Amino acid sequence: MKTFATDKIRNIALVAPHGVGKTSLADAMLHVTGKVGRRGSVDDKSSVFDYSDEELDKKQTMTASMAWTEVGGVKINIIDTPGVADFRCDMYGALEVVEGVLFGVKADGGLEVSSDALWRMLRARRIPMFLVVTRMNKEHADFQKAMKEFAEHLDGTVVAAQLPIGEGEAFRGVIDLVANKAYTFADGKAQAIPIPAELADEAAIAREELMNAAAETDEALIEKFLEEGALSDEDLTRGLAAGIASGQVYPVFVTAADSEVGVVSLLEAVAQLMPSPASRTELAGLRPGTAEERRVAIGSGKPTLAYAFKYQREAQGGDQTWLRVWSGTLSTGDNLTNSAGDGERIGQLSFAQGKGREKVDSVPAGDIVLAAKLKNSRIGTTLCASGVDIQLPAPALPAPTSAEAITSATAGDEDKMGVGLNKLMEEDPSFVVRHEGELSQTLMVGQGEMHLAVILDRLRKQFGVEVLRKRPKVAFKETIKGTVEVQGRYKKQTGGRGQFGDVHLRLEPLPRGENFEFVDGIVGGVVPGKFIPAVEKGVRETMKRGVMAGYEMVDMRVTLFFGSYHNVDSSENSFKAAARIALQKGVPDAKPALLEPVMQVTIRVPESYLGDIMGDISSRRGQPQGMEAEGPIQVIKALVPQDEMYQYSTSLRAMTQGTGEFAMTFSHYAEVPGDVARQLIDAYQKSRTEDAD
């Protein structure tokens, strides 16, 4: 198996919203370079990159896949990432290990809401990027419109590196502004032609803009450009490469995957302009198990250092962990230590070609490889040779937004369900499962309803567990708004020693968020000190269960200020019971109220859907907090009760034809409106009556 020096490797991720054509472009890359004999297709289920049953069925990428090809002696590792927001976990992992991104935008659709959100995230990382205008051969393709949108809505220096020759069905070639040459394509192969006369002036202007962008990366180049009015091809390439590497310049390329026009030129630009792994000489992280920052030097001659960024189970070949080799050489049989301090023996190594595997004995720094059957190294794990002591950051994943309450459909399958979900979380940490004892429910929380449905389908197919889904219970709270004084008296005589406890409590509201305060106001020993902790315990237990609607009580001060006892019949249990009776009597007279969790919701939609979204927010008892325009995108902030956000991602997708995105975080607790509170209280009281019957 051929190996490549570190400076002859390029690691790139294809990133774009769903429908832009990332996978089709990736398949075309393999075909035009001769890596495959026939170009794969998503439509006929022959794609090298989309190969799981779920992906073939839905014709969309759900997990990252990888293949590699060679251009001019340079190995290019291509990671195709999911475009649907529900499945972007693998994208975040890939961004931790690549030197560059090909950011796709449709020529016949332009920037989308998802494009804008992805761009901002990538820009914040300062990751080197090419903008790739895809589908140039489609009806309504418009390169100039796309460039105008880039200029208006994307920050950073966005500049054309290529111009299209023709658009739509007439798209047949590209003008390479770096080389100042034109090419047409047949079967993916480029043929040099003179720059068309009708495009000569446009090309000259665009090349001058490209030179200007390259010159601004270096003072010496600026001076040269100002003095001579032009840059040599060598200076232009050097300046562009520097600007791309620093995240300062974003060149634009044009392609059509199904006709393969421009694909080979794009790959040549990746090899020529994208940074190589050799450009990184050190990594930042933490000393394992501490918050102490640490940096280590990396390179081909340094100790071995690898990073696990994806984990997957395979029906054949066992578990596979995707590793980026940052330093040294990784070989089958190596004994390394992971960031948790566990030893790890490296199993069989292989390069991925989609679902295909090419076995290899060793891998140099800079390359990406799959390691079989690692026992202790999941996503975010750092593997080090002896003497290297660093933990690299785990991928930063977005907060989950959609939840379902789940139970096993078959009695006795609870443990089996738990084992299966834990194994699936090892592959996909962007969803979590948590048990909420207070509400007696198990919640599965993920990136959207589609995401959760796919996870549960995998649970059924891989582990044989059927799961029932239902609307999650919401953690409402009970509180009071008024002050009352109430007596609780517990007296029971059943023969022999009786039970007696008598307490007088003052119930008062506390400011929101202060939870609970118990005050011992007894004077003169009317309630002996040994029974006072029992009174507090009775109060706390009753508040935990709730009084009006079965939810925990909060934001209340309870003062024990009087009472009485019996020398023989009083006990801790009798005073606990007396405290419970007092609360149950007093709360209904203390202006009780229900509180509900309110979420801070940020929604990003095209302006044309603004009215529908605002109306929907109102129907969910939401309160708009502000709105601002970011080009054609409207960003709406609102406070919405959590109970009204159930399956919101599906609703938003339907309202905006799949173009809307949202995020939400907990904001605060607020009082539930009277009609909603009455429904909750009535439902609770009815359930208690039915239980009693």
Image (cartoon, rainbow, N blue to C red):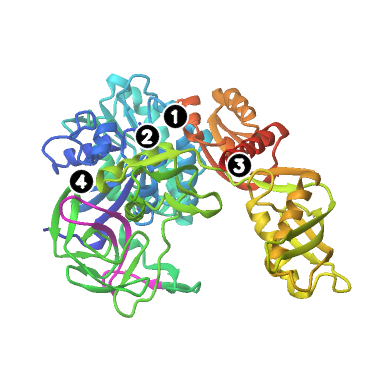
Residue, disc 4: 354
Residues at marks 2 and 1, CA–CA distance in whole angstroms: 10 Å
Residue, disc 3: 688
Q: Position of residue 37 (x, y in %)?
A: 10, 38
In the image, the segment drawn in magenta is 296-324
Seen from this angle, which residue lies furthest right?
Answer: 524
Q: Earlier in the sequence, mark 1 or mark 4?
A: 4
Residue, disc 1: 658
Label 2 sits on what residue type?
His
Q: Is residue 296 above or below residue 95?
A: below
- The answer to whether 399 appears left or right of 300 in the picture is right
Label 3 sits on what residue type?
Arg
Crowd band around label 1 with a 10 angstrom C-alpha radius: few (<14), some (14–19), many (20+): some
Numbered badge on residue 167 = none
Which of the two marks, 3 or 2, is nearer to us in this view?
Answer: 3
Which of the two marks, 2 or 1, is nearer to us in this view?
Answer: 1
Q: Position of residue 400 (x, y in %)?
A: 48, 46
Residues at marks 1 and 4, CA–CA distance in whole angstroms: 28 Å
